[in-house]
Image: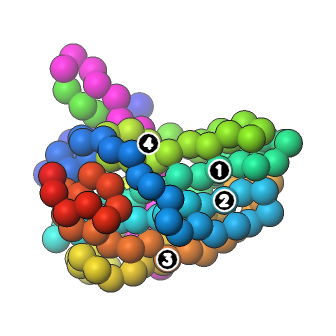
Amino acid sequence: MHFARTAAGVLALASCLAAAAAPAHEFHRLGDIVIEQPWARATPIKVGGAYVTVRNNGALADRLVKVASPLAEKGEIHETRVEGGMAMMRPVDGIALGPRSSVQLKPGGLHIMLMGLARPLKEGERIKLVFTFERAGTIEVEARVEKAGAIAPGHTEH
Ligand SMILES: [Cu+2]
């Protein structure tokens, strides 16, 4: 088990804590998989969070195994857990998607961590995210960058 303990990790974690429901305005389809409203948070550092709702409309289970971005050295899927009163996050090796189910990645829960960003992410820009599923394959989508500390896409407050 690995916990982010670097200064960058702590900063990124601090901006991961709030939770909110995200309305789906934008979606991308890949076979039975639907990627709904991907978004990311503006960040001045080399680590950033990204969020999305993933839906499996199929009768067979699938699994999100990888998220990458051309802007980041590495993408990780993280889960946030509260241990001893402190929110910690750790990488997980994928997200199971049962038949006809969906999983919401959001601040304070499961999320995507973009590590080693080539440059800061600025509010209003769009960045590429590449999702790879065990069964459905790979899809590239654009995620809108929201304000630092945003709790949901389209929101501007903490
Ligand atoms: Cu994280």
Residue 73 in the magenta stretch? The answer is: yes
| Point 60% across, 75% down: residue | 140
State how far apart marks 3 and 1 are (Cα): 17 Å
Sequence-wise first label, 3 or 2: 2
| Point 33% across, 44% down: residue | 20
Q: Secondary structure at mark 3?
A: strand
Sequence-wise first label, 4 or 1: 1
Residue 48 in the magenta stretch? The answer is: no
Please provide percent x and percent y for residue 69.
48, 72
Part of the protein shown in magenta? 68-85
- What residue is shown with label 3? 142
- The crowding category of the residue bearing disc 3, from other C-alpha atoms within 10 Å (few below 14, some 14 to 19, many at least 20), is some
Residue 34 is labelled as 2
Please provide percent x and percent y for residue 143.
44, 72
Q: Amino acid at mark 1?
A: Arg
Disc 3 vs disc 2: Cβ atoms closer than 8 Å? Answer: no
